[in-house]
Every structure is written in C-alpha cells, then in structure tokens.
Amino acid sequence: MNSIIPLTGGIPQLIANVIVILVMIHVLLGGCAYGVMLERKLSAWMQDRVGPNRVGPKGLLQPIADGLKFIMKEEHTPRGADAVLFTLGPGLSIIPAMAAFVIIPWGGILDLGSLPSFITSFLGIGPSLVKVVGANLNVGVIYLIAVTSLGVYGVALGGWASNSKFSFLGGLRASAQMISYEIPMGLCLLCVILITGSLEPYAIITHQQQFSWNLIQQPLAAILFYTCMLAESNRAPFDLAEAESELVGGFHTEYSSMRFAMFFLAEYFHVITGSAFFALLFLGGWSVNPFGGLVPASWNWDLPLVGGIGLILLQMAIMIGKTAFMVAFTMAIRWTLPRFRFDQLMKLAWQGMIPVSILLLASAAVMTYYGITQYMWIATGACLAIIWIAFPFMPRQENPNRRIPIIGSRFSPLADERVVTASKHPIALNDAAIPDPRQGTMSIH
C-alpha cells in the first residue's frame, strides 16, 4: 500500500505541515465556537422552539457574545481546593484535544508544480509532492489514540482538586468510563488496521478507495467505534461525568469563567477530531465512491490522490463536510437518547461491547490470514449471526429495575390486611372524553 503513495519530505513538506496546522487550528477553533451555536439551533429545531437569534443577524454573533461573557466573568477558586492542580485540570483537557488533529489528512497529495511560479519562487521551493496533513507520521493512528487518551487526566484532576464531593464523583465516573471504552475502541481500530495493513492515515484512505469504505465492510465495528467515541468525549447518552440531575455539574461544578469554558472547548475539540477520525477510518476520507472494488470496473471511479490546488480544495471540502455531518449527528443523538445509569454504562462496555469487539477482531484476523479482506462484510454478517444465536444462552443478571415489595404498602399488604387500590370516584371510573358535570366536581385545585 505504501508503494501507491509517493514519498515526500524535506523543506517543502515541512512548510506544508506548518501551513496546514496554522489553517486548521483556526478552522477548528471557529468550528468549536459555532459548534455550540449549531447544537443550540439543532436542539431548538428538534424541540420545536426558537434557538439563539438575538445577537447579530440570525444569531450568528452569539458565539462571540458567549466568549466575551466567559472572559469577563469572575474567576473563582473554591475554599480548600488545590489552586495549582485546579488550574492545571482544564489545560490537561484541552492540550491533548488540540494536539490530536495534526495527523488527520484533510487532502491528498499536492503537486507543487501546479502552483503559480511566483508562489514557489517566494517560498524558495521547486516542483515536488507534499501531503496536506499537519504531521506526516507512519504511526499516525497510534499517535491520535495515545494523545486523546491523556484527556482523562484533566477531567480526573479537575474533579479531585475541586474539593467537592460532586466533582470528585464526576471525576471518578469519567476515569472509569474513558478507561472502559478505550478497550473496545482500540479493538475496533485494530480491525481496521488488520484489514488495511498499515498505521498510516493515507494508506487507510487509499485502501478504502481501492476496495470499499470500511463502513460497508465493517459496519458493526463502525457502530462500536462511534459509540466509544461518544463515551470518550463525555457526550450524551454517556455524559455520566456531568449528570446535572445527579452531580449538579460533575467534574466542572466548581469551575467558572475561562477555566469552565476550556473544559467545553476541549469537549468540542474531541467531538470534531473524533468525527474527522471516524471519517478517515470508516467513511473513506475524501473518497466519494463508497463501494470501490465491490462494483464493476466501469463504476469503480474516485478522486485521484495526487493533483493541483483545485483537487486539494475539493478533497478538503469533502473531508470537512463529512466531519460536519458526523458532528451534527452527534448533537442529534444528545437530544434523542436518554442518559444511561452508571451501572448500565459499565455493563454495556464490559459485558457487551468488549466481547463483541473481540469477536470482530478475531474475524478480521481470519480474513486477513486467508487474504480475503475484500469479503469482510461477509465476516461481519457471520459475527452478527453468532451473536444472535448465542445471546439467548448467555447468563442473565437479576433485573435491577425490579419492584421491591415494602411490607405494609398498598402493593404489598400484610397477610390479614385488605387493601383496595381501585378508585371509587365516578369521574375516575368514567372513560368519556368530556365528563358529565352532573357527576360532581371535575377539579378541586
């Protein structure tokens, strides 16, 4: 696979890396700001109400107003908190999130010979090929997973240093959740790496262009990976670390002003980077043909890997569009599914997702060993069949939602007690749409 990708390096590639980092860091920062507005607008649309529309035309200046509000609010450190660690927590959350995106390839390979001559002469570079990526790492996938996993330290540290029982419990929940869901996420990632045969992001994209998107080849692994991504980002229905109904605000309860904003900036950075990573692994990156080698040769067309600035801009638009779609989908899930209980969260990971991901990894290893990875979708179907057959024979736990009888209640009366739970009022016994006023008082409020 590496033979498909031209080797690049030297000063031209370094300049391209710096430009991509400077451009995309500002794009992602703007995306975080307007991602908050998108979530508020999307939630308003789903709940049939009006979202932010007061600041600027159509409310487009609302993110600026929110930023000014956070900057001008008072910084508060609770009594008894460790001031150094309390301040360090938000930084340890946002730095890994901002450092992870550099391995995402936003475009293919740019032919510098297609640029105007005055640009190449100004930069002092000759005709060459450069990759449109922040950091051209052969182990880019491992780098992203390793860096994003460091975010748990910021959450746990912020919860512990706050000197608050709600924050402490939120930090414990976040730590257990992130560590638990990193296991099935890594196993699903291994499925992609086995099929692709490389840790390089460009090789993963070109493999999907040659065969088909991993979403088609490994749909179950894609679902599990996306679910783990939600849990890693503390997004609903996995926002047990915040859980306003239980922990007030969880690990960031005691935070205010910009330190509070940094936690949310880190969350949205994780969401955007995770969505781009999902597009890279399962949506073919900038690929526009999801079927690839599964269709006849006349239909097996896609965007070329190497080209001029026009092709690169088109590839970047496709990649950013897929990322934006996954971000919007993540926000829609927040307002669709209810929050799990913590025991349900752990049970889903350890008793559900980890065994299934191990089964998927074993099937990917078998298909790779026999050299028939283009039929991985058949192996995924076989895994679903195994799960469907084995599920009825799996051991069952006692229902945690069972009704516990309380002696003396009307649902569990004493042995010699006669309790009548049925209503005797005529209105309660009448199923008419509009009760007859002659039956008596209809409301006693």
Image: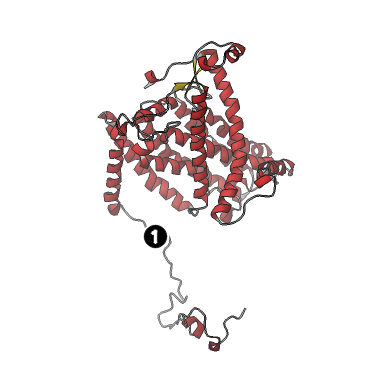
Corner quadrant of residue 76: top right
Residue type at numbered disc 1: Asn
User: In terms of depth relative to the viewer, which is nearer, 232 or 119?
Assistant: 119
Residue under circle 1? 399
* Residue found at the very far left of the displayed protein: 370
Residue 334, position as x, y percentages in the image: 52, 50
Residue at the (57%, 32%) spot, across then down: 98
- Mark yes or no: residue 19 visible: yes
The C terminus, quarter of image: bottom right
Q: In the rendered image, which quarter contains the N terminus?
A: top left
Q: Nearer the viewer, residue 193 or 105?
A: 105
Which residue extends farthest front?
A: 298
User: Seen in the image, is 1 located left or right of residue 148?
Assistant: left
Residue 40, image x and y in percent?
60, 49
The one of 324 and 72 positioned closer to us in this rendering: 324
- Judge by depth and name the residue closer to the eye, 10 or 301: 301
Q: Residues within 10 Å of mark 1 (few under 14, many from 20)?
A: few
Q: Dot 1 lies on which element?
A: loop
> With respect to residue 402, does 434 lie above or below?
below
Please provide percent x and percent y for residue 45: 56, 53
Left or right of residue 40, residue 303 in this image: left
Q: Is residue 68 above or below residue 13?
A: below
**Residue 417 picture quarter:** bottom left
Residue 20 location in percent, x, y? 56, 25
**Residue sitting at x 53%, y 30%:** 101
Left or right side of 24 for 419: left
Q: Is residue 415 above or below residue 210?
A: below
